[in-house]
Image: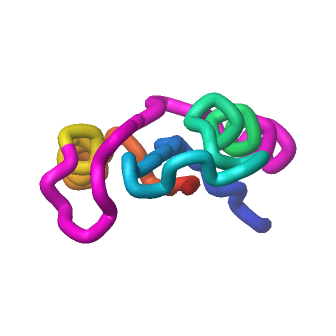
Amino acid sequence: MIESILYNGGIYCRLSLDDGSAGEFGSIQIQKMMLEKYCKDNRYTVKEVYIDDGYSGLNFYRPAFKQLLCDIEAGKINIVIT
């Protein structure tokens, strides 16, 4: 018998101030919408949405990213969609 895996997802969106107007996909709202659709299409339960708007990706000193890592370690989520 094949077991199905229950995925509890965390969506992570980030847009740096340096990204400026990055075109069609350059907004947090668009990223979030696309990732939520992906989760729905793949039957992933979205437990949390993590958003770091205006933070550089050059380091890990981002509040939502830190919370994401804590939630992974706590077992709250077991898949990250970004």
Residue 69 location (% of width, % of height) = 24, 53
Identify which residue is drawn at 13% across, 54% down: 61
Front one among 80 and 60? 60
Identify which residue is drawn at 44% across, 47% down: 14
Q: Quadrant of the C terminus?
A: bottom right
55 drawn magenta: yes
**Picture layout, residue 37 above or below residue 12:** above
**Picture layout, residue 72 above or below residue 39:** below
Front one among 64 and 78? 64
Q: Residue 56 lies in what quarter of the image?
A: bottom left
Question: Residue pushed farthest right?
Answer: 41
50 horizontally vs 40: left or right: left
Magenta residues, start to end: 37-62
76 horizontally vs 58: left or right: right
80 horizontally vs 68: left or right: right
Residue 11 location (% of width, % of height) = 52, 43
Front one among 68 and 2? 68
26 drawn magenta: no
Q: How is the image coloured?
A: rainbow
Question: Residue pushed farthest left?
Answer: 61
Give the mark count.
0
Residue 32 location (% of width, % of height) = 63, 35
Residue 3 location (% of width, % of height) = 70, 60
Q: Quadrant of the N terminus?
A: bottom right
